Image (tube, coloured by chain):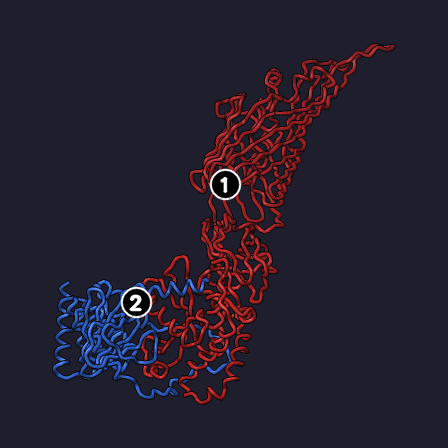
Amino acid sequence: MKKIFILSLLFSVVTFSQTYKVAKVSGTVRALTNGSEKWIEIKSGTELSANSIISVEKNSSVKISSGNIEVTLKELSAVTISSIKKMSTEDLLLALAMENILNAPKKPNDNKSQSTAVYGKNEMERNPLIANTEFGIRRLNGAMQLAENGLKESAIISAKEVYRKYPDTKSLASYRIFFADILFDKKLFEEALDEYNDILKLQLSNEQKEKVTNKIDEIKRRISIK
Amino acid sequence: MAQNSFDINGYWANDLIPNARINSLELNQSSFTGVRDWLFSITYSSEFSNKSNSFLHQISTYKKFNYHLFHLRYTPGLQKEFLFSTGQTIFLSDSNSQSLKADYVYKELFGFGYSYSFNEKFNAGFSLRFFNQDFTQEVIKPVFSDTNYLMIETEKDDIDLWKADLSFAYRFNNNLSIYLSSINLLSSESKPLYDYNRNYLLNKERGLSVGFSLEPFNSTAFNFNYESDKSFSASFNRILKLSFGTFGFSLSAYHDKYQNPFINCLAPSIFYSSGLFDIVLSGIKYSEERKQVSSFDKFSENGIKNILHNQFSFDRVNLTVNFKLNTKIEQRIKIIDVEIRKDIFPALNEEYLDEPFASAKVVNLTDKILTVKPAVKIIGLNKEAIQIGSYQIAAYDTVEIPIYAFIPEYSEISKTELSYAEIFIYSASEQADDQTQKPVLLNNMNSWDGQVKNLRYFIKRDLSNSQNYSRQIISSHKSELDTIPIALSDFYRAKLIFNSFIKDLTYISDPRIKWDFVQYPSETLKLKGGDCDDLSVLYSALLESIGIETALVDYRSRNDIRHVNVLVNTKLSPQQAFLITENDTKYFIRKNQFGIDEVWIAIETTSLTDFDTAWNLGSDIFNDEALNKIGLLNGNVQIIDVN
């Protein structure tokens, strides 16, 4: 009985949280729902769970509503449904703090298992195969569109998650600058400065370089005034 | 008459230098608390009369048994002799004459004392002393015969006297103590043969003596004593503690109602005390010049109460040496209290080496910095006391030190029961300075303290059994695993093991609904079931035993019902994650200790269906609780790496 009780409680989190409904679909829009590995095409009126991923194909768009939030996603974008939510600046700061926890390296330990089994693989043995960067870019597009729909805080967190799961996308300067600018606009100067300094290490066009440098100078000026 | 409370070595506060006083039988037997084991004392005293008598004044010994103190004293020098002319003279035939004499000798021969310490504040004791009064008087007696004549005869009276007194001491704090003793409470005296001697017997008038010692500073004391016959004494003591011993100085002043002038005498004394012996050099200086010759009327009018200190006493100088023989180790550390902070869960053995299960408040009784080593023996768990850790304590400081328990790795405690922790504190020797015993709950081997981080002890305990089980599964799927890219090895092994062991298991809710009982992996396999912590422990142990890294996730968002599931490290890089799933909500990136990103997946072991379902469910829970509700930040969700 406890199993049923625990599981029902856990599911209730999903059940009683916001419901997301597909309001309008144009072209082809697919989704991965409930941990599924199979993409399904969605239609208007489909209800989606928070952990669903929605992906909008070329020349397509979708409008998703949840309560008083309405978001339109354009072509070649993907978002996790749970990221369609309004966040305050405080929520954003908390979420960024959690990003730091997630990005912290595991503490070394001196108490390793004494197993005689062969442990994992040497890093050199890893076969990276083909990095799935294309879907990562869709994810970044999705995050940008969240910002364009007014969900800027949520967009930042979505972008951070994309950078973690699709690390190759971190080299795409234009996206990086876009999200760093949001931090700047939200007056989160220290967070923005870290981001701009990191962006400077990428290969940038002259125009990008000038913009980032100007932003860094501006932040330093503002921080010094404080 | 004379005041009773008179010490040949001056009036010292016992708390300051306990061994300085030697005649505690007279003043306050109960207050003599400074002897630790054996003490032998000898005093040589010289009185500055014309005869310049010198005596071995006293030999005494003290012995302490726990809270009991015994004192035996032999005092050959404690005597006073008075020689008087009776006023009668015989003229002899050869024109010579002979005056008749009377001789009065008072002796205190030996004494016995006992005191008992009820607690740190209150002591009580009694004393028993034996006196002898030897009176001789020459008298003329006629002899009737053929020729009548007179002859001188000596009438001898030997009178014994026993005196018993009670005494009490109460210590309010480190600065103030008070004393109360009886004077001549009980006495028993043999009858004089000659009635005329009754007038010269030692005075046995009952009385009371009260006093206090005030120590405003650690090294200074003021003492005052008052007797019911309106005599009093006062003194000032000062000590100096040096590395090689303690020096002390005292000046006492005495007012005896029956002596002149008002302050009859002063008694200076100096003292040196080391670990093995004490030396006291003291003097008694009377204010008025004492005459060698005095009238018989004065003697017979006031009588004698104190053999040592009376109106006929002379200046003195005294030397006392105390020898200390300690068969016991000097207590340098004292335990004030012990607090048991947590019960003993034998399964969490290593935990007790990191976190103390108790704390002891101890005081350094010495004037030196001490290194102390606590040791503990838990009855039913340890065969002997185990020392763990050492701490330095400043002189006279009171500190709280942690007490760690050592739990043998292969303890077999089948039943939870109340046990006792014997706690010892060592400073220098092999003998503990102090020890105490406290009750502690000794849980059985399956008991768990509810902290998910401590489930790792259940995981690690029978890792070899888990390894055998996992290897059997892997072996039976060898051909299948051989076709899988090496990068996916951990993921598929984790999947195969889950799908193999889970099909035989049943979810069994812990009937106690309390986080207090966890099965070891082998027990869960044997019983074919368990609750979420049992199943998480089992799955984690099976993977860890073959080198697959795992972590436990503690979900604490619901106060009453907590939950545990398992994170598995696939060792894949984020770029390789698509090899196991297209759904990027089903994995999480964690950096290893070298800062390299690795793909982890959450598995809900209670799903008891198949790996994919358990993975989906685990992902949903982790996404909701840990990420969307920022549980990892607010502490509602905690990831605990097993290794």
Q: Viewer-proximal residue, B318 or B542?
A: B542
Residue, disc 2: B628
Q: Colour of chain A?
A: blue
User: In the image, which disc is placed on residue B16?
Assistant: 1
Residue that appears at 50% across and 75% down:
B501
Task: Residue lying at the far right in this picture: please name it.
Answer: B146
Q: Chain of mark 2?
A: B
The kind of residue on which mark 2 rests is: Asn
Residue B219: where, in percent of width, then height? Answer: 45, 42
Dot 1: what SS?
A: loop
**Looking at the image, is B378 positioned above or below residue A190?**
above
Decide which of tag 1 and tag 2 comes sooner along the chain: 1
- The percent coordinates of residue A120 (x first, y second) are 43, 82
Residue at the location (36% across, 78% down)? B598
Res. A176 visible in picture:
no
* The color chain B is rendered in: red
> Badge 1, how many Cα within 10 Å: few under 14, some, many 20+?
some
